[in-house]
Amino acid sequence: MASRDDGLRLVERKVGNSNLIKHMLATEAIMRALAVKFDADVDAWGLAGLVHDVDYKKTEKNPEKHGLVGASWLEELGYPADVIKAVSCHNEMTGVPMESIMDKALHVSDPLTGLIVACALIHPDKRLSSIDVPFVLNRFKERRFAAGASREQMEKSSEIGLTLEEFVEIGLNAMRGISEELGL
């Protein structure tokens, strides 16, 4: 299996945007925490989160290809099939069906990072440690706040057996665990 270091090198080579890399690190952290919750392969789930947007720069003008190009790269590099599949279907526009819990977890985790970061950034000290689950849930209800973070996608946490509150708590705690890397 490709290692985290392999994934990180790939991301650094292909992405180039520091905010996008932070998003990918945050998604990795959430996916690792969810893998622990579901007694799944923490390394594989983390790797899927880390590399899920590896093709963003290449596909930003063709969003229907986002995930498919990355999955193709990952396949060429010998990444595990479950990681490739999760990357290929995390973007609903590809039309690739989400089947496994890893697929669904990546799909719902992707927008959560943006909501949590936006919540931290409106706090005076801009720190993840200064926000809590109720604060994030209150902002979740404000559709214009962090409008790019799809509420519909995050609400699908029920498809992986978690309430929205449980999901946000896992995500926030996971991101707090890498707050220094995120600069938050």
Image (spheres, rainbow, N blue to C red):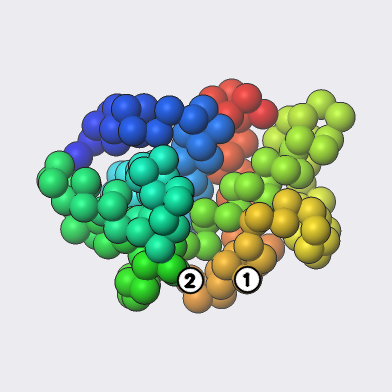
Residue 182 or residue 14, whichever sits in front: 14
With 152 as the anchor, is 27 left or right in this view?
left
Residue drawn where x is 59% and y is 47% of the image? 113
User: Which residue is labeled 1 in the image?
Assistant: 152
Q: Quadrant of the N terminus?
A: top left
Residue 53 in the image: x percent, y percent? 41, 46
In percent of the image, x 86 and y 29: which residue is there? 124
User: What is the secondary structure assignment of the residue under circle 2?
Assistant: helix
Q: Residue furthest front?
A: 61
Q: Is residue 133 visible?
A: no
Residue 135 placed where, x, y %? Answer: 81, 51
Give left or right: position of 103 versus 178.
Answer: left
Disc 2 marks a residue whose amino acid type is Ile
| Crowding at mark 2 (Cα within 10 Å: few <14, some 14-19, many 20+) | some
| Circles 2, 1 touching at the beta carbon (< 8 Å) | no
Tell me which residue sits at (45%, 51%) in the image. Answer: 61
Q: Is residue 178 above or below residue 36?
A: above
Q: Amino acid at mark 1?
A: Glu
Marking on residue 47: none
Between 36 and 104, which is closer to the camera in this rendering? Answer: 104
- According to the image, label 2 marks what residue? 160
In the rendered image of this protein, does residue 174 appear above or below residue 84?
A: above
**Rendering quarter of residue 123:** top right
> Of marks 2 and 1, which one's residue comes earlier in the chain?
1
Q: Nearer the viewer, residue 32 or 9?
A: 9
